[in-house]
Amino acid sequence: MHKLTKLTGDISSGDSIRHTKHNPTRKEISEQLEYSRQSVYQAFENANNTEQVINSAEAGIQDIESLLTGIKQTAIRASNEGANNPAETEAMQIEIEKSIEQIRRIAEFSDYAGKPLLKGTQEVKFWSVSPYFTVVGVEAGHQIEITADAEQAKILSRQTLQKITGSVSISVYMNGKSITHTHNAGEDPGILIDQFNNSFKAQTVPLTASVDEDGRLSFVSQEYGNDIEFKVSADNSAFWGGDSEIITATGKDITGKINGEDAPGKGRIMYAKPGTPEDGLEVLFNGSVNKDEPPDYPLTGAVGIQNAALGFQLGTSTDAHIKFNFKNFIPEALGHHTENPKGFETLADIKVTDFDSAQSSLLVIEKAIGEVALKRAEMGAFKRHIVDTSASQSLKRMKMTHAPTAQYAIPTTP
C-alpha cells in the first residue's frame, strides 16, 4: 500500500525525484536547472521590457527628426531673401519657433515608467578627484592633461592716463557695438573706468575696464577662447602703441589631451574627439586653485565620472548589465559648438529674419540633425543587441525546459 501511494504521488507531481533522499545528486541538479530556467525567463522578460523603453525613445526621436527637417526647409526658404517680403519672413520665423517648442515638449514628455528619456535627466553626473577640473561626460575614469590654459582677449595701453596731455578719445568695438569715452588730463582715472564699465553693462558687452598700478588702461574679455575678439582705437596713436590705428585683441582656446589623445578645445572646455571611447566627455578647466601662483604645465589629473545613465539587465549574470545614455534633446542642447557668423549657440537661438541669420541657422540645424541621427543609430545598435540577447535567452530557456535531467523529466518506476 505504501509503495502504491508513493508511486501515485510521483506520477501526480510529474517529478522524477520528489525528495532529496531518493537521489540527492539528481535532486540538486534538478533544482539548479530550475533556478537557471527561472533566471533565463526573467532575463527574457527584461530584454522585452528594455526593447519597449527604446521603442518609446525612438518614437520621440523620429518626431524630433521630422520637425528638424521642417525647420531646415523653412530656413532654406528664408534664405531666398530676394523673393520674400517682410511678412513672409516674419511668418517663417514664427513657424520655426513653434517647431522648436514642439521639440521641447517632445523631449520633456517622452518617458517610460515615469522616467524621462529625452530631456537629459538620465545623463551623466560627475565628480572630480582633481581640484582643477569640472567634468561632464560618459564613462568611468579618464586621464586629463592641460598643456595650456585658455586666454581671455585683453589689451593694455602703452601710455598711462596720468601722462595724458590735453585729452584722449578712446573707443572699443565688440559684437557690432561701439563705445567711446574721453579722458581729460588731470582727471581721476576712476571716472573713465566707471564710464566704460557702465556702458559695457548697459549694452551687454562682455568686457571689463580697469587701470593697473602704473596707471595704464586695460580691457579684458569676460570669456575665453579663439572666438573672443574686440578692437580698440584712440585719437592719439601713441596711447595704445600699435602699428595701426585699430588694435585687435583675441583670446585663445585651451589645449590638452584626454587619455593621451589631443582634445579640441573651445574656450576653457576640452572635448574628446568624436569616434573615440571618450566621445561625449567635456572637461572644463577652472584654473589654478592658488590664483597667486600660476600652475606648472602640463597639469594632469585623473577624473572620475559617476554614470547616471539608465541600466538594463539583459542576461543572468552581472556581466550582462548594460548602461545606455539617452541624449538631451531639448532645443538648448542641440546644435552646440557650431561655428557660425551670427554666433547662435544652440537650436533655441536661431533666427531667419535676414539672409545672414538664415545661413547661420542652417549650420546649427544641420549640426542638430546630425546629433539626432547619430543617437538614433546608437539606439538602433543597442536595440539589435537586445533582440540578439532575447533570442539567445529564449534558446537557453527551451534547452533547459527539455533537458533530460530537469525536474520535469519523465517519472521512473520505483
Image: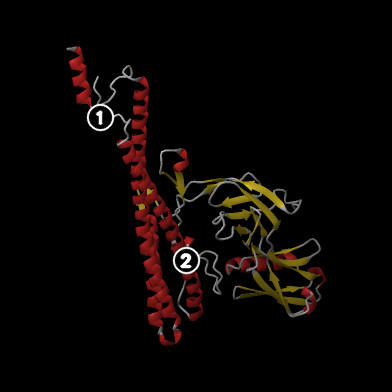
In this rendering, the answer to whether 341 lies above or below 384 is below
Q: Is residue 22 left or right of residue 288?
A: left
Give the left or right position of residue 189, taking residue 199 as reference: right
Q: Nearer the viewer, residue 322 or 219?
A: 322
Q: CA distance from mark 2 to mark 1?
A: 59 Å
Looking at the rendering, which quadrant does residue 213 occupy?
bottom right
Please report the residue visible at 56 percent of the width from the left and 46 percent of the height from the top.
Answer: 140
Instruction: Answer with left or right where residue 151 lies relative to residue 400.
Output: right
Total labels drawn: 2
> In the rendered structure, which disc, 2 or 1, sits on the residue that comes first in sequence?
2
Q: In the current view of this chain or complex, which residue is farthest to the front?
A: 413
- Residue closest to the far top: 1
Which quadrant of the view contains residue 317? top left
Q: Is residue 186 visible?
A: no
Circle 1 — which element?
loop
Instruction: Tell me the amino acid under the disc marked 1.
Output: Ile
The structure residue drawn at horizontal position 76% and vertical position 51%, both measured from the top left corner, is 293
Q: Residue at x 78, y 79 (%)?
A: 243
208 or 375: nearer the viewer? 375
Residue 238 in picture, x, y percent from top left: 80, 77
Q: Which mark is residue 348?
A: none
At mark 2, the secondary structure is helix
Closer to us: mark 2 or mark 1?
1
**Residue named by callout 2:** 370
Q: Position of residue 147 (x, y in %)?
A: 71, 57
Residue denoted by label 1: 410
Q: Amino acid at mark 2?
A: Gly
